[in-house]
Image: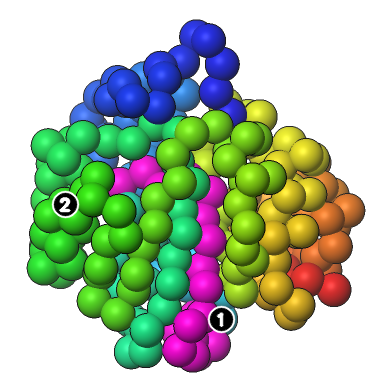
Amino acid sequence: MSDLAHPAPEDEPALDWREGGVPVSRDFDDPYFSLAGGLEETRHVFLAGNDLPARLVPGFHVAELGFGTGLNALALAQVAQVPVRMTSFEAFPMTVPQLARAHAAFPALADLSAQLRAGWGRGVITLGRVSLTLVLGDVRATLPAWRDRADAWFLDGFSPAKNPQMWGADVMAQVGSHTAPGGSFATYTAAGHVRRALQDAGFAVARAPGFGRKRHMSRGRLA
């Protein structure tokens, strides 16, 4: 996920900004959310891809690779009607001003995004009915040390072509071992090596229609 050429976790990410308030990572040359509509993509890929909110019950645990702007957490909080836990792994956390600039693109989430920024850096963050925990650092080290399991995964790191370490077979194996029985994953990518790694990790993997210009995405359940 990271190497010596990339900033340490405590450094703010270097960003460019495209029309519509879309942040783009200079280090990975990749936008943080879809230029065709970030919230719509999140709902299509990560919520619908994991059959959410229909599966949400008290204590349901969502985990995520790649917190970014927090858009997925905000979208989850918008639909959660019961207490839900979320754990997100992130190596390059944004600053509050960077978050505020990105969040301005989603006025429908203004109240929740304000809660996120208010709790930034203060431990567990409350977003509506979602209790959010951020785990900072290289996921290749932080995920193996994690002592919990998720009912659903949002796999939302930068593109596998531009951030291959995050999508390696070793990380996908850890995703599988940190998934509860019957748990699920969803991701925007349909890259063959990612799909194979998730199959090797124990998931029954399927392709599904992607969002916007992406023809396919991937989703699956722990077999």
Which mark is on residue 117? Answer: 2
In the rendered image, which quarter is residue 192 located in? Answer: top right
Q: Which residue is mark 1?
A: 51
Q: Is residue 121 above or below residue 11?
A: below
Task: Identify the residue shown where x is 75% and y is 77%.
Answer: 181
Residue 183 visible here: yes
Can residue 209 be seen by looking at this rendering? Answer: no
Q: Residue at x 37, y 89 (%)?
A: 82
Image x and y of residue 24, in percent: 33, 31
Q: Main secondary structure of the magenta part?
A: loop
Looking at the rendered image, the quarter that the N terminus falls into is top right
Instruction: State the extent of the magenta-drawn residues as a range.
Output: 52-69
Residue located at (21% from left, 35% from top): 95
Question: As shown in the figure, which amino acid type bears the numbered disc 1?
Answer: Asp
- Residue 130 is situated, as x and y percent measured from the top left of the image, at 34, 73
Q: Front-most of 28 and 175?
A: 175
Front residue of this view, candidates 79 and 137:
137
Report the residue that reaches farthest toward the right: 200
- Neighbourhood count class around disc 1 (C-alpha, 10 Å): few under 14, some 14–19, many 20 upward: some
